[in-house]
């Protein structure tokens, strides 16, 4: 059985319960698995074996960077680590299988997002912050003040002071876990403020940074963490995912090509009907590339994103319109990216340097739009610029 450190003292009041991503959908609207035990994690045996070995050793490092493409299981793995580290009922068999028990009080608390020693930090947490400035601001990153409130403590911009959850004892006496999702969105001030905690956290405290852009983390952050690489999964793992979620056979080939080995992307596309987006939008972008101007394309893109956001908020009243708009924009970008990937592969196969350069230039337009959305540029203007530049690529 792996050794587990515990906190030294019990605080007087429960910690703030973690909250799911604001754009998350209620469980009943998600694809339903055939089996309900264990994490929905596929094709990451090498990564999970590395984590399981560390836990099993009894000398697990306190800080980890889980890095890789979107939708391949980084945050899912971090949550499973949290279950194993927080649950005294997890034995060596659970650790070796990388599957914590699901019939314990700890599992019940984690499932209900109310475990006082599990802290999940995302930019959307600003929406229910006790700091008015954070609630009122459109969040495109994880600001220092939010990190102070939810993790490291300190005085924030409005003069309010927060104790540090990191330095509190474990409420249930069995470790504390902090997961920072999209850690690349930590601003430079937040990353610098996190350094001391990463270097010398209290015993029994484990920190996981999940990121798709590890290069945006400071070298000093990376040097203090153990790294685990997550990769796009192979066809067999995607097939297992399709089976688990009972994806119809006729949808599998398109989803496999669209998602490029990312089950999370496949789930997003399947759930929200992105094949219909692809069928409508991609012929119009193809015509645009051939020199046929489409004056209504940018408006249609904005309309699709708006309709998507309205549907998400209607299905889940706790979701914010802003988060839903960001998710809808991501769906549009994924649709365009699927075309660009196909064009790059085709141009490379034909050894057509000009076509390859044009496809690469359009990928840069997608990346630029993503940056503009993060910077809170007006979405309609950004989409209009994308369409204009897309057609201008030679």
Image (cartoon, helix red, strand yellow):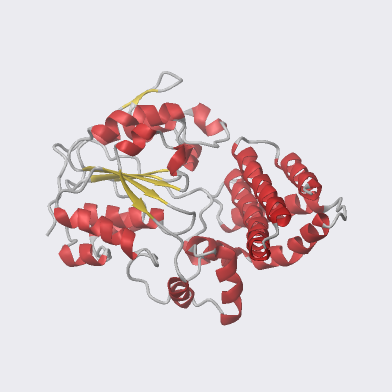
Residue closest to the eye, 228 or 332: 228
Residue closest to the eye, 96 or 361: 361
Task: Please tell me which residue is depicted at 63% across the width and 48% down the height of the picture.
Answer: 325
Please give left or right for residue 354 compared with residue 256 in the image: right
Measured as percent of width and height from the top left, residue 64 is found at 31, 45
Residue 341 placement: quadrant: bottom right
Measured as percent of width and height from the top left, residue 296 is found at 84, 52
Task: Please tell me which residue is depicted at 52% across the width and 58% down the height of the picture.
Answer: 25
Please give left or right for residue 235 compared with residue 14 in the image: right
Measured as percent of width and height from the top left, residue 111 is found at 35, 58
Residue 129 placement: quadrant: top left
Determine if residue 18 is in view. no
Q: Is residue 208 above or below residue 236?
A: above
Task: Please tell me which residue is depicted at 49% across the width and 61% down the height of the picture.
Answer: 264
Determine if residue 277 is in view. yes
Measured as percent of width and height from the top left, residue 379 is found at 70, 42
Q: Is residue 194 above or below residue 5?
A: above
Please give left or right for residue 83 compared with residue 32 in the image: left
Q: Is residue 216 above or below residue 81?
A: above
């Amino acid at each position: 059985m792996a050794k587990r450190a515990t906190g030294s003292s019990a605080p007087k009041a429960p910690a703030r319960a973690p909250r799911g991503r604001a754009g998350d959908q209620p469980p009943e609207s998600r694809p339903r698995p055939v089996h309900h035990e264990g994490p929905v994690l596929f094709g990451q045996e090498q990564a999970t074996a590395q984590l399981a070995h560390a836990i099993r050793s009894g000398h697990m490092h306190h800080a980890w960077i889980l890095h890789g493409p979107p939708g391949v299981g980084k945050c899912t793995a971090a949550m499973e680590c949290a279950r194993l580290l927080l649950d005294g009922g997890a034995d060596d068999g659970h650790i070796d299988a990388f599957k914590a028990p699901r019939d314990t009080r700890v599992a019940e608390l984690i499932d209900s997002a109310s475990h006082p020693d599990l802290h999940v930090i995302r930019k959307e947490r600003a929406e229910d912050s006790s700091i008015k400035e954070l609630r009122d601001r459109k969040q495109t990153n994880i600001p220092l003040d939010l990190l102070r409130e939810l993790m490291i403590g300190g005085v924030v911009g409005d003069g309010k002071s927060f104790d540090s959850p990191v330095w509190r004892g474990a409420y249930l006496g069995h470790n504390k876990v902090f997961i920072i999702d999209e850690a690349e969105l930590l601003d430079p001030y937040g990353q610098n403020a996190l350094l001391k905690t990463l270097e010398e956290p209290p015993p029994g405290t484990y920190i996981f940074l999940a990121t798709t852009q590890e290069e945006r983390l400071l070298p000093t952050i990376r040097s203090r963490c153990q790294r685990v690489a997550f990769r796009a999964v192979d066809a067999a793992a995607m097939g297992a995912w399709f089976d688990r979620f009972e994806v119809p056979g006729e949808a599998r080939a398109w989803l496999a090509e669209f998602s490029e080995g990312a089950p999370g992307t496949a789930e997003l596309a399947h759930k929200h009907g992105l094949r219909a987006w692809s069928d409508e939008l991609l012929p119009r972008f193809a015509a645009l590339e051939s020199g046929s101007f489409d004056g209504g394309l940018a408006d249609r893109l904005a309309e699709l994103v708006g309709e998507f956001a309205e549907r998400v908020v209607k299905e889940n009243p706790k979701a914010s319109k802003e988060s839903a708009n960001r998710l809808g924009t991501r769906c549009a970008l994924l649709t365009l990216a699927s075309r660009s990937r196909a064009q790059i592969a085709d141009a490379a196969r034909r050894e057509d340097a000009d076509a390859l350069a044009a496809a690469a230039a359009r990928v840069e337009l997608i990346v630029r739009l993503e940056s503009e959305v993060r910077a809170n540029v007006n979405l309609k203007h950004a989409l209009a610029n994308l369409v204009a530049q897309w057609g201008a690529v030679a």
